[in-house]
Image (tube, helix red, strand yellow):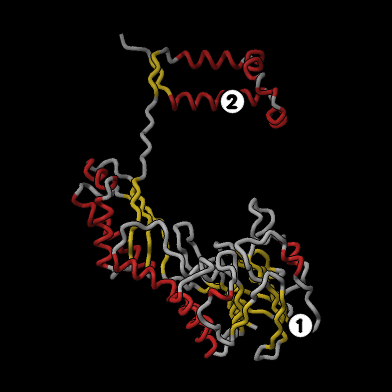
Amino acid sequence: MKLLHTADLHMDRSFEGLTGIPTALAKRLREANQQLLMNIVTVAIREAVDLVIFAGDTFHQSQTSISMQAQLMAALEQLKQAEIPVILTFGNHDYYKKDRYWFSFPDNVFLFEKEMVETLYFETKAGEQVAVSGFSYEHPWIDENKALEFPIKQAESDIHIGIYHGDTSRKAQQNYAPFTWKDLKATGYNYWALGHIHQPQIVSEQPLIVYPGTPQGHTKKEQSLQGVAVVTLSQNQATVQFEKVAEIDWTNEEVSLAQCRDTQSVLSYLETSLLTKWHAHQQQQLMALTLKETQHLDVTVVQAIVNGELLSYLQQQLLQKTQGDFFVYRLILQAEEPTKEPIYLAASPNLLTALEKTYLDPVIFEDTTKELLRYSEFAGIFSMDEQWRLESLRLAHEQINEDFTIQEDPL
């Protein structure tokens, strides 16, 4: 069988960390979550999957708007028309309260409504006998290890799938149905469809255990996302491939201004560089841009970066030239490390040679380094022999010559 596994859509969550965005862009951001659902439906139909799994936190809150609920129902209805069944669980954000839903779910959708583990049985079009076990949150947290309640796979099921929204008990926070990988593997299931962690992870291949991650990032931390997991299962094999469905990508980019000879060349160079990056990406982008190698330019450039004037100009120009697909939300000036100049030391160049000869004496060297030998970690690694003394002095000689210029004052 083939299934599509997604989790942590957080459909009603805003794109966080953005200020002063134009009205048209704000509208596009609101529409992105709706289009995300349509993209998931498109992948499910194109891949002709036998099942779609939503593994919790489809919404960002347990009481979401009528409009958001209607968008979800419309997507589920499309899957119904394609004769694709759906299994949906509720996570710690969208924990289930029946009376908060304005619409009835289509009859192709099975809901895990309780915190008690339940098992659903169905048959695929190819005649495979499938069992799916799972649970939902009815509160914002679950302290118990729910993995211990999952039944062992039975012989009459060709394929057994577990759905689990939670995190491992090794993490400091224990409020999200803490479990261990050993607990999951002990069930003998063919596949574990996980939710709660927003970064994609293939935790195990035998059995296949996957966090697909959030399919659409809503903060600058949610980058390098994979999309939804398309999983192919048989009794003895499980494989996964990811399909990108996000409408908007968060990116971090660096641009060097080393090639800009003067203030006048900065704007055209930046616009050209950024539009080239956007064309290569072919995706709506929210970008944090770092400018580096600016020390040769006039202070006017640095001032425009610091006071936000350059950012405002770039936002306006790039939104216009990309029909609203490209927004630089942050402009960062990379601090330049000052060139390290050697320290001038007024002394005879023979001073260093004399000091090195002094420390070549084993007694003097040992007396100088005896404090180090008090630490067992150090004494166990290094042998205080002649070779070690010579190597230490060689390295010291190189470092001193790098940090100091030793010469006598001219008369």
Return the residue nearer the eye: 121 or 247. Answer: 121
Image disc number at residue 315? none
Label 1 to label 2: alpha-carbon separation: 68 Å
Question: Total number of numbered labels?
Answer: 2
Q: Position of residue 83 (x, y in %)?
A: 57, 90
Q: Residue at x 63, y 53 (%)?
A: 173
Left or right relative to 322: residue 187? right
* Residue bearing the label numbered 2: 392
Residue 41 at least partly seen: no
Q: Residues within 10 Å of mark 1 (few under 14, many from 20)?
A: some
Image quarter (top left, top right, bottom left or bottom right) of the C terminus: top left
In the image, residue 3 above or below residue 247: below
Q: Residue at x 39, y 25 (%)?
A: 342
Q: Position of residue 310 (x, y in %)?
A: 25, 52
**Tag 2's secondary structure?**
helix
Name the quadrant containing residue 231: bottom right
Q: Position of residue 361 (x, y in %)?
A: 63, 14
| Amino acid type, label 1 | Ser
**Tag 1's secondary structure?**
loop
Name the quadrant containing residue 33: bottom left
Quick one: which residue is furthest to the right in this view?
155
Residue 125 at least partly seen: yes
Q: Residue at x 67, y 18 (%)?
A: 370
Sequence-first tag of 1 and 2: 1
Return the residue nearer the eye: 204 or 391. Answer: 204
Q: Nearer the viewer, mark 1 or mark 2?
A: 1
* Residue bearing the label numbered 1: 157
Left or right relative to 336: residue 122? right
Left or right relative to 189: residue 277? left
